[in-house]
Structure formats: structure tokens, C-alpha cells
Image (cartoon, rainbow, N blue to C red):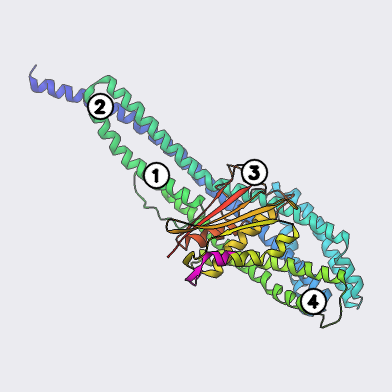
């Protein structure tokens, strides 16, 4: 047998072995891709359905607030526009409640419908009595325990339903990342197994397997890694992703399905932003005159007030101011997302801003008998927006007040210089933060306790907004805690000049 023939036979043998290994590897890859092609389109349909349910819940909450506010405004002001608005909105809400999206929602929406009918009957009675000039009787209906109890049942039932849908919605966003991780791990497993087989069969096939492994890994792993990065980006709330369609046909189809899903999510996110902007505007508009009228009453220009009346008016004003702060935070978040938030950067002494923030909340400290310990270093001059830094301090100090124990609360506030930064520390002896939650408290709308019986209020926006403001000052903010019931510390660093 000539050498050339032996060489050809040897080459054919190596080629045959390589071909078998290549076919087996390709079959495994195709199996992985086919499974994903089946799973991803189904997940997209789930997204659409759950997003529609979520939007329905938000619309019900919105129209319910309009009904309640319209009825109360008509009873108190006798302005016909509120009665007209009530009568226009009531059929819309009734239709939403009576058309659940699936059989799974029938029981909840049936209960909501019963409660809504009772509320509408009571509100219609109040409107009728107002039309008859019986204002006190109309007001007594809307301020009765029965009306309040029905509103609480209605709100808690809908809130529980909305929270469950939000949780499922967030879990579905993360599921695509898990799918990408599974595909990547399977690719790694197949590559390792193929390498072991080649090393055992013949040393020359090692080089060939490395070549094939690099080729297929780059061809398959690169677009999959792009998908993984995009899924992580979406999980963080950033839907501005752009993935190049490349790779084998199966991968291209997977990327197309993914881009379709991102497009749907982006539409839903824009709807959420529009809804948020609309609802905050609707909430903010009546707050200004309410606070103004309360201030007029407190000024005693319309007559003297007894202590009980003064206390009730102050409660109304404080509640309105808290609502106004929440609305302002939501508006700021929306401005940030639309890149419209502006900063008025000037040279300021950080310690003076911190001092002013403490003085603004002095009444709140006194109410809970919280001890304040200050250690403020002078002349920490920074290029910053004084109003925004004050907003950050108010948010953090308000959280500390809320979570500190009554009578025995203590808050330490420290400012000092660390290298080229102004370092701010707010330390309290409150309930603390568990290790699994400490990295999540700066996530938008995140709350450690999301149950309907949670003791501490808040919108989950303050710390997220504070983080964005500090980062726009080229600074950083983080939290430290030794665990639950062991207090917590918020640290802020801003460059000094």
C-alpha cells in the first residue's frame, strides 16, 4: 500500500470520526435550540396576557379613585361637574369589573362587583341627598363606618390581586434569563464531553476538537451571551436593548422572538409611564387647593378653632403634604426616565445642607422622642444641587424616623472628609436590614414588606430616587446593616472641590 493511500485512508478515518462527533454535537445543539424555540413564544403570550391583566387592575384603581373623589367633591361643593364626572365614570368601572380576563379572576372580580355595587349605592344615596339639600346626611354616609369598611375591603382585595399579577409579571421577565443560562450551561457541558472523547480517541483529534469547539462556541455562544446580557438589562428595568440578529437560523429565530418580546414589554412600560404621569397629575391637582384652604382655616381668618378642630386640620395638612411628597418623587422618577430631570449645580457646604435638613424634620424627631447626635465637619464644599441633596437627606432621615423605635430611637448624623470626598453617614437603631434585602432597597418601587398588614408606609421610590440623584453628582450611596433588629447605616460620598 502506497504512502499516499495510507495518508488518504488515515485522513478519511480522522474525517469520519470527526464527522460522527460533529453530528452528535450538532444534534445536541439542535435539541437545545428546539426546546427554546418552543418555550420562548409561549412565554411571550404569557407576557401579553399578564400585562393586560395588570393594566386592567391599574385602570380599576384609577376609575375607583375618580368615583370616590367625584362623589365626595359633589357632596362637599355641590358643583355639578363632579356629579357629571361621577355618572360618566361609574359605567366604565362597572364594565371593567364585570369582564374578568380569565376564569381564574372570576371569584375575585365577582367579590369586587358585589362590593362596588354597595359602594355605588351609598354614593348615589349621598348624591341624591345632596340634590335634596340634605348635606349633613349626605356627608354622614360618606364618612360612615360602613362606607369606610367597604372601601377597605374593596382596596385590599384589588391590591392583593394586583400584587400577585405584578409578582408573576416580574418572574416572567426573569424566566428568559434563566432560559439563556440553561442554554449556555448545556453548550459548555457538550463542549467538555466532546473534548474528553477526542483526547481519549487520538491526540490529533484534540486540535481538531479545539478548532471545532472555538468555531461553534463563537457562532452559538456569542448571540446567546448577547441574549443573557439583554435579559439582565431588562430585569433591571432598562428596555432600551438592541440585539444584532446573527448566528445559525435557529438562533436567529430565537433572537427575533426575543426582540418581539422586548418590543411588547417596551410598549407596556411606556403605557405604565403614561399612566404614572397621568395619575400623579390627577393626584397633585387637588392637593394644592386642599392645603391652601386648610392653611386659611388654621389662620383663623374665618373664625376661632378649638383644639380638636386644630388637631384634625393639622392631620389633614400633614397627610396632604406626605401625599404631595410621594407625588413629587414619582414625577421626578418619570422625569429621570425621560431624561428631563435638571440639576442646578452650585458650590455649597454639604454640612450646612445636612444641618438644614435636620432642622426641617425637628418636629418629627420630637413627636417620636428620637435623640439626634450630630457630628458635622465644616467647609465640606461640593459642586452640587442644594435642593436635590436636601431631598436626598429628607428621604433618608424620614426612613430613619419611620423605622426607629418610639421613645428610645436614636439617629447619628456624621459628615467628614475622606480623601477627596465628603462622606455622610446616617445611622439609626431601628429594625435593620437583612442581608438578602440590603442590595435591593435602592431598586425602584422595592419594599421589604409588601403585605397588606405592613406597619411602615412608603412608596418604595425615595431611596431609588436618592441613588439616582447622588450618582448624577458623581457620587455613590450604599447601605450597611448587621441584620434585622440591629439598626442600619446609609453612607453617601460626593466629590469635594
Instruction: Kindly state the secondary structure of the residue where label 2 is placed.
Output: helix
Q: Is residue 105 magenta?
A: no
> 308 left or right of 90?
right
In three-dimensional space, the C-alpha distance between marks 2 and 1, rounded to whole angstroms, equals 26 Å
> Which of 195 and 318 lies nearest the eye of the viewer?
318
Q: Quadrant of residue 357?
A: bottom right
Given contact means CB atoms under 8 Å apart, are the residues at marks 3 and 4 in contact?
no
In three-dimensional space, the C-alpha distance between marks 1 and 3, rounded to whole angstroms, equals 41 Å
Label of residue 225 in the image: 1
> Which of 458 and 429 lies nearest the eye of the viewer?
429
Q: Nearer the viewer, mark 1 or mark 3?
A: 3
Q: In this view of the protein, can residue 268 be seen by the observer?
A: no
> 88 left or right of 167?
right
Which residue in the structure is indicated by mark 2? 206
**Residue farthest to the top?**
1
> 344 left or right of 460?
left
Earlier in the chain: of badge 1 and badge 3, it is: 1
Label 1: how many residues lie within 10 Å, few (<14), some (14-19) or many (20+)? some
**Residue farthest to the bottom?**
301
Q: Residue at x 58, y 42 (%)?
A: 436
Instruction: Kindly state the secondary structure of the residue where label 4 is placed.
Output: helix
Which residue in the structure is indicated by mark 4? 298
| Rendered position, 7 above or below 291 | above
| Rendered position, 58 above or below 324 | above
Q: Residue 165: x percent and y percent?
A: 64, 50
Residue bounds of the magenta highlight: 341-354
Which residue in the structure is indicated by mark 3? 486
Q: Residue at x 19, y 25 (%)?
A: 12
> The N terminus lies in which quarter of the figure?
top left
Amino acid at each position: 500500500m502506497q504512502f499516499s493511500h495510507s495518508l488518504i485512508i488515515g485522513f478519511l478515518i480522522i474525517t469520519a470520526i470527526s464527522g460522527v462527533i460533529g453530528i452528535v454535537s450538532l444534534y445536541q445543539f439542535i435539541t437545545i435550540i428546539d426546546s427554546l424555540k418552543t418555550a420562548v413564544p409561549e412565554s411571550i403570550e404569557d407576557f401579553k396576557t399578564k400585562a393586560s391583566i395588570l393594566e386592567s387592575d391599574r385602570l380599576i384603581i384609577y376609575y375607583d379613585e375618580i368615583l370616590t373623589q367625584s362623589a365626595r367633591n359633589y357632596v362637599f361643593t355641590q358643583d355639578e361637574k363632579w356629579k357629571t364626572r361621577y355618572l360618566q365614570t361609574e359605567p366604565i368601572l362597572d364594565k371593567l369589573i364585570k369582564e374578568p380576563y380569565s376564569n381564574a379572576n372570576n371569584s375575585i372580580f365577582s367579590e369586587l362587583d358585589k362590593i362596588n355595587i354597595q359602594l355605588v349605592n351609598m354614593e348615589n344615596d349621598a348624591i341624591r341627598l345632596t340634590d335634596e339639600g340634605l348635606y349633613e346626611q349626605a356627608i354622614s354616609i360618606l364618612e360612615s363606618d360602613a362606607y369606610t369598611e367597604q372601601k377597605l375591603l374593596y382596596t385590599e382585595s384589588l391590591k392583593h390581586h394586583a400584587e400577585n399579577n405584578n409578582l408573576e409579571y416580574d418572574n416572567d421577565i426573569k424566566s428568559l434569563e434563566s432560559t439563556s443560562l440553561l442554554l449556555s450551561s448545556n453548550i459548555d457541558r457538550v463542549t467538555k464531553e466532546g473534548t474528553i472523547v477526542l483526547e481519549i480517541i487520538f491526540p490529533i483529534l484534540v486540535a481538531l476538537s479545539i478548532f471545532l469547539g472555538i468555531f461553534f462556541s463563537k457562532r452559538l455562544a456569542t448571540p446567546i451571551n448577547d441574549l443573557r446580557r439583554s435579559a439582565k438589562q431588562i430585569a433591571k428595568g432598562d428596555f432600551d436593548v438592541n440585539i444584532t440578529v446573527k448566528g445559525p437560523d435557529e438562533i436567529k429565530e430565537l433572537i427575533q422572538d426575543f426582540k418581539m418580546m422586548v418590543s411588547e414589554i417596551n410598549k407596556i412600560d411606556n403605557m405604565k409611564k403614561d399612566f404614572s404621569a397621568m395619575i400623579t397629575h390627577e393626584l397633585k391637582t387637588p392637593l394644592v387647593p386642599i392645603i391652601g384652604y386648610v392653611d386659611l382655616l388654621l389662620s383663623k381668618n374665618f373664625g376661632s378653632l378649638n383644639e380638636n378642630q386644630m388637631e384634625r386640620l393639622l392631620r389633614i395638612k400633614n397627610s396632604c403634604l406626605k401625599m404631595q411628597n410621594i407625588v413629587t418623587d414619582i414625577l421626578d422618577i418619570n422625569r429621570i426616565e425621560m431624561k428631563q430631570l435638571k440639576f442646578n449645580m452650585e458650590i455649597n457646604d454639604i454640612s450646612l445642607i445636612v444641618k438644614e435638613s435636620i432642622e426641617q424634620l425637628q418636629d418629627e424627631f420630637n413627636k417620636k422622642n428620637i435623640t439626634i447626635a450630630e457630628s458635622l465637619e465644616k467647609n465640606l464644599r461640593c459642586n452640587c444641587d442644594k435642593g436635590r441633596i436636601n431631598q436626598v437627606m429628607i428621604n433618608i432621615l424620614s426612613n430613619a424616623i419611620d423605622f426607629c423605635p418610639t421613645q428610645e430611637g436614636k439617629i447619628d448624623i456624621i459628615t467628614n472628609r475622606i480623601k477627596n470626598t465628603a462622606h455622610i453617614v446616617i445611622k439609626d437603631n431601628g429594625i435593620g436590614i437583612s442581608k438578602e434585602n440590603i442590595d435591593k432597597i435602592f431598586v425602584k418601587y422595592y419594599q421589604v414588606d409588601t403585605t397588606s398588614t405592613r406597619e411602615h408606609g412608603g412608596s418604595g421610590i425615595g431611596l431609588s430616587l436618592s441613588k439616582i440623584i447622588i450618582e448624577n453628582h458623581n457620587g455613590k450611596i450604599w447601605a450597611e446593616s448587621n441584620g434585622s433588629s440591629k439598626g442600619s447605616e446609609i453612607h453617601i460620598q460626593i466629590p469635594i472641590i
